């Protein structure tokens, strides 16, 4: 290696070391410490614990128990159904709302109002959201009583069959934060549609249907599908809302995991780690597909 090349390598090395000690890197150091303590280390402990017994010996018995117990496998299936329903519903309604505020020709004040509300609502989950829905759609909730007393409609009657503490009720509750999250995700993609594409379609004689069928939707499709997968992962890992709303009446996997780790009857932490290991695999597949689809959509929307 020539002397000049060696100097370049040394200079690059010094620059890299200097950049690591720069004020900007020191500023984000708390983020890395936070991620290490509350995400990376717990995940590593969880994954190791899934392959250990309570004495610390490595084993595959936890995965075997997971596959042998039908109620645990059923909990995965119920969680997948709730997550799919809330993700598809959130993606559909969120896309329509985003389209309305970006290309719907609404008054200018509507857009910031909707985006601000979406930012708040997408983070409103857990116990407060569960109690808010109980106070609204519970058996003596505000909307339930108003519908019964003013319009004579009892949503808890046998004919309608609504129950907030059921699959339908939990999906409806999840939609409260899924729809705003979809709005926040898909608005930048809708804004990336270039006006020249619509003009070119019109010049070539295309209608509005042709523009959306052959131009807009093919460009937006990776973003829409990726956002739906992200909503699925967001719903699949939710536990506080479901536990506060339904208790143990709905057998979803996060409640089963909580019962195995914290419960007095089903206490088996390593089986809980195995349940969480399965959840990590599912959410990793969902998030990985989202990142891949997002990369494809960004090539068009730059």
Image (spheres, rainbow, N blue to C red):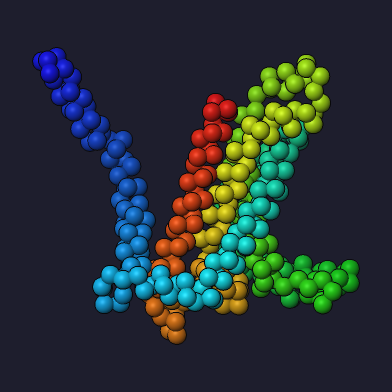
Determine the residue positioned at 61% across, 34% down: 189
Residue 113 x/y as whole percent: 66, 43
Most extreme residue toward the right is 151
Determine the residue positioned at 10% across, 15% down: 3
Q: How many marks?
A: 0
Quarter of the rendering occupied by the N terminus: top left
210 displayed left or right of 80: right
Most extreme residue toward the bottom is 265
Check the image and report above or below for 41 versus 161: above
Determine the residue positioned at 48% across, 46% down: 288
Residue 67 x/y as whole percent: 47, 71
Q: Nearer the viewer, residue 26 or 248?
A: 248
Q: Nearer the viewer, residue 216 or 176?
A: 216
Is residue 240 visible in the rendered image? The answer is no
Q: Quadrant of residue 151?
A: bottom right
Determine the residue positioned at 50% across, 68% down: 254
Check the image and report above or below for 145 versus 216: below
Residue 266 x/y as whole percent: 44, 82
Q: Nearer the viewer, residue 273 or 142?
A: 273
Is residue 4 visible in the rendered image? The answer is yes
Check the image and report above or below for 56 versus 225: below
Quarter of the rendering occupied by the C terminus: top right
Q: Nearer the viewer, residue 56 or 260?
A: 56
């Amino acid at each position: 290696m020539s002397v000049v090349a060696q100097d370049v390598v040394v200079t690059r090395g010094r620059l890299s070391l200097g950049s690591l000690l720069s004020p900007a890197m020191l500023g984000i150091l708390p983020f890395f410490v936070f991620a290490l303590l509350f995400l990376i280390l717990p995940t590593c402990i969880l994954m190791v614990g899934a392959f250990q017994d309570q004495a610390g010996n490595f084993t595959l018995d936890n995965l075997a128990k997971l596959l042998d117990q039908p109620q645990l496998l059923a909990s995965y299936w119920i969680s997948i159904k709730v997550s799919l329903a809330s993700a598809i519903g959130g993606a559909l309604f969120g896309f329509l709302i985003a389209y309305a505020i970006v290309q719907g020709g609404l008054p200018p004040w509507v857009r910031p109002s909707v985006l601000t509300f979406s930012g708040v609502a997408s983070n409103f989950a857990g116990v407060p959201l569960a109690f808010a829905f109980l106070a609204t759609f519970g058996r003596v909730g505000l909307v339930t009583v108003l519908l019964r007393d003013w319009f004579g409609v009892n949503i808890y009657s046998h004919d309608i069959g609504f129950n907030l503490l059921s699959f339908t009720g939990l999906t409806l509750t999840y939609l409260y934060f899924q729809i705003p999250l979809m709005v926040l995700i898909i608005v930048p993609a809708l804004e990336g549609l270039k006006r020249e594409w619509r003009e070119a379609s019109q010049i070539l004689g295309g209608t509005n249907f042709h523009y959306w069928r052959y131009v807009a939707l093919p460009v937006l499709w990776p973003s829409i599908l990726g956002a739906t997968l992200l909503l699925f992962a967001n719903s699949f890992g939710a536990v506080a809302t479901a536990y506060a709303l339904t208790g143990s009446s709905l057998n979803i996997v996060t409640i089963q995991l909580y019962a195995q780790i914290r419960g007095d009857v089903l206490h088996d932490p390593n089986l809980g780690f195995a349940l969480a290991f399965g959840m990590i695999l599912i959410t990793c597949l969902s998030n990985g597909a989202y990142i891949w689809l997002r990369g494809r959509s960004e090539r068009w929307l730059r």
